[in-house]
Amino acid sequence: MKKPELLIPAGSLEVLKTAVIYGADAVYIGGDLYGLRAKAKNFSMEDMKEGISFAHSYGKKVYVTANITAHNQDLKGIREYFKELKAFGQDCPDALIVSDPGVFSIAMEEVPEIEIHISTQANNTNYETYRFWQKLGATRVVSARELSLEEIIELRGKIPVEMEIETFVHGAMCIAYSGRCLLSNYFTGRDANMGACTHSCRWRYHVVEESRPGEYLPIEENERGTYIFNSKDLCMIEYIPELVKAGINSFKIEGRMKTALYVATVARTYRKAIDDFFEDPMKYEANISWYMEEIKKGVNRQFTTGFFFGKPTHEEQIYDTNTYEKEYTYLGTISGKREDGLYELEQRNKFSVGEDIEVIRPNGDTLEVLIKKITDQEGNSMESCPHPKQMIYVDLGVELNPYDILRRKEN
């Protein structure tokens, strides 16, 4: 058994660096155009080049998404975009993630030296599809989320050993087949397949009877409520042995719009679970409850195993809310140390002197600390820091390191 790659999402340069430090083997990102997360911060070309260089300095890989369903007017820009990526030289992306055959062809023409991975948006549900893409030059295919573990095992046995399987193992589930959804386009004119999804599946719906216009009737599902498309989040951390034995090459985490705290929490937990299993399966089994406890500290909509063990039932839906469960608030990431011994960070949510918070570290350690002092950049003492993204300095009574993350447990 070969240790699988842990592939982590990043929507900004800050989050990319966090993913690398907290255990990712590879990170996938998007530029300002041509990816399916238009509302994410995404990367300018300058940030992308810096991020790839940073990852490469740690021996990690970066994959760039270009997985929109392209229209005629997109093709010229995509070609120029690929040329710009090629100009990065040794810090060009390690792979492009595409779904559209036309975009695939352009990539093969313009950047044949960059590997091509086929996005889950291409509806990759069988071994002949994998063979098809390999013959054209793809090195990896992302399996459709609708595949069971049994189907992936059969698929693995019928494709060349060098052909890689990438599979989502954690994160939000889309109600539409392989994410190809028209709800957002229909309701708002924002096309999910062009990166502008409004997540219409998470909305609350009512029924209007034709003879009673304007009278909105709730959609009731017995005691369960009214959200009809609202899936729980995927979580397979309790099934690492099964995923490894199925021959999956890359474990993919969803979440390019998530915070650095979420990425750090999920990355370091899956990192430890994978490493523990390969060190000693008994160690992995002994730590399963810890993995689940830690993974729940990231925002989530409750958990499901999706399609891995059969078709989901009504038990995999959430009927009473469309909001995340959130145990912790992200306060900031340590970036340096001042001469007076205080530590620098860019504040992300308000906190105050005297509060008890936690510090999480890439090695899995979690420290409970007290905020003893806060100052601004000029050294003026502050009782609290109410302004988001303000650069501040703190004394937490412990030695800190760059990329240590501060979080607060909420009631």
Image (tube, helix red, strand yellow):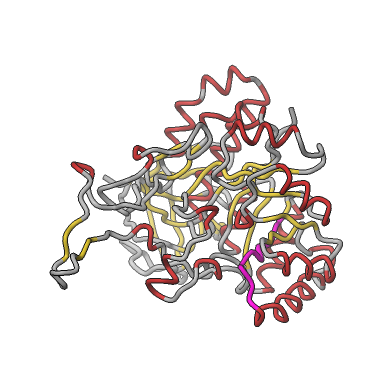
Q: Main secondary structure of the magenta part?
A: loop
The image shows residue 61, relative to residue 185, as above or below, that is: above
The image shows residue 43, relative to residue 58, as above or below, that is: below
Q: Is 282 left, or right, of 136 in this rendering?
A: left
Q: Position of residue 143 (x, y in %)?
A: 63, 46
Q: Can residue 66 be found in the magenta stretch?
A: yes
Q: From this viewpoint, is residue 255 visible?
A: yes
Name the quarter where the C terminus is drawn: top left
Q: From this viewpoint, is residue 367 visible?
A: no
The image quadrant that residue 57 belongs to is bottom right
Question: Residue reaching furthest front?
Answer: 211
Frontmost residue, 217 versus 66: 217
- Look at the image and give the residue range highlighted in magenta: 62-71
What residue sits 56% from the left and 62% below the top?
A: 11
Q: Can residue 15 be found in the magenta stretch?
A: no
What residue sits 48% from the left and 57% below the top?
A: 259
The image shows residue 1, relative to residue 160, as above or below, that is: above
